[in-house]
Image: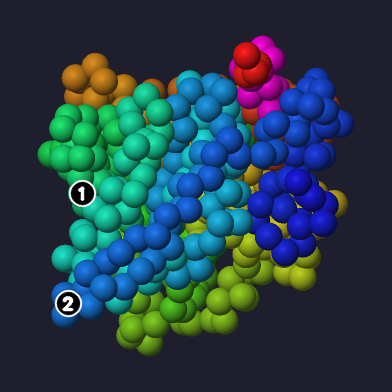
Amino acid sequence: MEGKGRAMDSPYGRFLTIVDEVAGCAAVDGAELERIKVPERIHTVAIPLRRDDGRVELYTGYRVQHSSARGPYKGGIRYHPQVCLDEVMALAAWMSIKTAVVDIPMGGGKGGIAVDPRRLTTGELERLTRSYTERIYRDIGPEVDIPAPDVNTTSQTMDWLADEYGRLTGRQQPAVVTGKSIAQGGSQGRDTATAQGGFDVLQAVLADRGEQLAGMRVAIQGFGNAGATAARLVSEAGARVVAVSDSSAALVDERGLPVQRLVHYKAEGGRFADLDDSIRRIDQEALLGWEVDILIPAALEGQITAQNAGAITGRYVVELANGPTTPEADGVLERRGVTVLPDILANAGGVVVSYFEWLQNRQNERWSREDVNRRLGEVMERAYARVARTAAEQTVSLRLAAYCVAVQRIAAALPHREPRLLLEV
């Protein structure tokens, strides 16, 4: 793998670059590091879809299984026109790191289909999901690989996937996926888990430094489920959300935006660009440099770059998106004294509660939302404490410390026996 050569232009290259940096602070030999850099399995599938008008179209899908050293592969499935193998490989690798950072007994995987779901009807989305499941069902399962929702997929998508898996295998097994609807075995708290976990980590770091959220100014890039929930949580804690954006527009109000109104508006399918003019709009790029204490990127990868990192005013960056900061931007932020709560820690709440859902399905239990959030808080605070301790001991950033913790845990779990050779007789 050519990590350094690919770092500037691909998500997987950025992953490889950071893993190379880990060699300086993790007690892991080179051979183990190389194994962690390479996915165990890559599945590329052709997915036929019968459209409502009878036409049949072919889509490309992926399922990358990065590491099973610590347990079954775990990771979401996204539907997006820009899905490509490099991106899915990076997301699968980040999932391996993420599950190891929070110390749950799972590995990392990721899937996706290169499709614009907005151009499909509900019936077409269901047929696409079932067709994709038919292509990968032999390679997933409750003890093998457990998918979940991601960008543009929902609990309904997971319900379809689980149902199709049951039809194809002859066994209904809810634990084959997580992020299902509550009626189909989903977990309470899964809908808010990503933002709740990031909020728990933010509260932990602020407590470490004798600070509190009350009175702080917050900007949030991306107002999907994670961004909207984060806005609600920080505002309920006394912070002032002064800038937010979705894919259509960015909004600001120095007095504090009407968070609840915006949350309801987005839940009903609204776009910020279609709001009335009572709320001021700014250029979307300007949001990243808006004067705040906390910036929460909750959109897509690669949003904070070497070109715009110098404009960021926030003292804290809480990465609810996957890979929102490039390695070059990381260096800029570190030199400026900005504390980045890295994605592999800050947004791991989703996979933690996915693990809780899997446990509940396997044990035929139902936990309350309060119980889920309490357990989640304990896991996230424990993970942050370990990462912060490593960062202090090694004098490295929280991101590098989180990678060090994760890589050491994965390396310790790698099977070290030599493969058997098939001898001619």
- The foreground one among 279 and 118 is 118
The C terminus sits in image quarter? top right
Q: Residue at x 56, y 32 (%)?
A: 67
- The foreground one among 268 and 108 is 108
Q: Residue at x 61, y 39 (%)?
A: 39
Q: Estimate the x, y position of residue 86 in percent, counting from the top left.
A: 61, 56
Are the residues flagged by discs 1 and 2 in contact, CB closer than 8 Å? no
Left or right: where 122 falls relative to 203: left
Residue occupying the far left of the picture: 183
Q: Residue at x 40, y 50 (%)?
A: 77
Label 2 sits on residue: 54
- The foreground one among 112 and 222 is 112
Q: Estimate the x, y position of residue 352 in percent, counting from the top left.
A: 43, 31
Q: Residue at x 18, y 37 (%)?
A: 166
Q: Under tag 1, what secondary structure?
A: helix
Picture quadrant of residue 328: bottom right
Q: Is residue 109 visible?
A: yes
Q: Separation of disc 1 and disc 2 at Cα?
A: 21 Å
| First to last magenta residue range | 407-421
Picture quadrant of residue 339: top right
Q: Under tag 2, what secondary structure?
A: loop
Q: Estimate the x, y position of residue 30 in percent, counting from the top left.
A: 82, 28
Left or right: where 163 falls relative to 389: left
The amino acid pointed to by label 1 is Trp
Label 1 sits on residue: 160
Q: Estimate the x, y position of residue 44 in percent, counting from the top left.
A: 48, 53
At label 2, counting other C-alpha atoms closer than 10 Å, the crowd grade (few under 14, some 14-19, many 20 or more) is: few
Badge nearest the viewer, 1 or 2: 2
> Please, is residue 133 above or below residue 32 in the view?
below
Label whose residue precedes the other's in the sequence (1 or 2):
2
Q: Is residue 190 visible?
A: no
Residue 131 colored in magenta in the image: no
